[in-house]
Amino acid sequence: MNEELYEAAKRGDSIGVQSALSQGANVNHQNPKEFEGTSLHVAVRGGYHDVVQILLSAGADVNLIDTDGDTALIEAAREGNCDVVELLLKKGADPSHSNNYGETALVAAASREYSNIVQLLSEEDDPNTSVHNKELYEAAKRGDSTGVQSALSQGANVNYQNPEK
């Protein structure tokens, strides 16, 4: 059943994933043929949000690593799957974990220029970053140089773009 689960997750087949799980597949099985990756690893690689949600609801360990030291979060960031990165973070994925090559999810996203994921992961480092970014935007809009300096000194991203535009 574990192989069926892995293959269904790899295809993005949510019905196949649910079927394999209901028949007793181990949601955290590490596939020895695929660098000890789990069904969660392949689902995030494919950007299959619904399958990722099913696996997490079934108890998938969000921080399991494969033989390269990659977590599902690193895989999702590397592939540019922002909605999956956000879901994994909400489910407790560790953004500070680095793989065997020293690559974190943030480095993986930055090296591929996925700015939306870089911003999301940067905000994860400091939960107040989004507040500081909004303060920066509002201060700049008002022409308030002291407010701009204050927001930047507190960790606001100088390249922040207002998503409400």
Image (cartoon, rainbow, N blue to C red):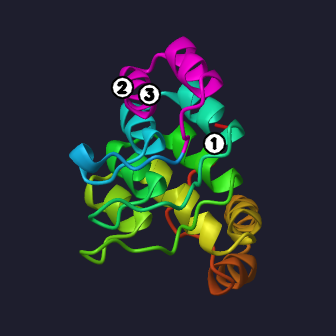
Whether residue 165 sits left or right of residue 29 in the image: it is: right
Closest to the observer, 114 or 62: 62
Asked which secondary structure carries label 2, the reply is helix
Q: Which mark is residue 51?
A: none
The spot of residue 46 in percent (x, y) is: 37, 31
Q: Are marks 2 and 1 in contact (CB under 8 Å)?
A: no
**Magenta part of the chain:** 1-27
Whether residue 28 sits left or right of residue 31 in the image: it is: right
Q: Residue 61 occupies which quadrant of the picture? A: bottom right
Residue shown at 46% from the left, 46% from the top: 29
Q: Which residue is mark 3?
A: 9
Count of picture labels: 3
Residue shown at 67% from the left, 45% from the top: 59
Judged by depth in the image, the label closer to the viewer, 3 or 1, is 3
Q: Which mark is residue 7?
A: 2
Amino acid carrying label 1: it is Pro
Q: Residue furthest top?
A: 15
Amino acid carrying label 3: it is Ala
Q: Which residue is mark 1?
A: 163
* Label 2, residues with CA under 10 Å away: few <14, some 14-19, many ≥20: some
Q: CA distance from mark 3 to mark 1?
A: 32 Å
Q: Pick whichever of labels 2 and 1 is earlier in the sequence.
A: 2
Asked which secondary structure carries label 3, the reply is helix
Judged by depth in the image, the label closer to the viewer, 2 or 1, is 2
Asked which secondary structure carries label 1, the reply is loop
Q: Are marks 3 and 1 in contact (CB under 8 Å)?
A: no
Q: Where does the C terminus fall, quadrant-wise? A: top right
Residue 92 lies within the magenta run: no
* Label 1, residues with CA under 10 Å away: few <14, some 14-19, many ≥20: few
Amino acid carrying label 2: it is Glu
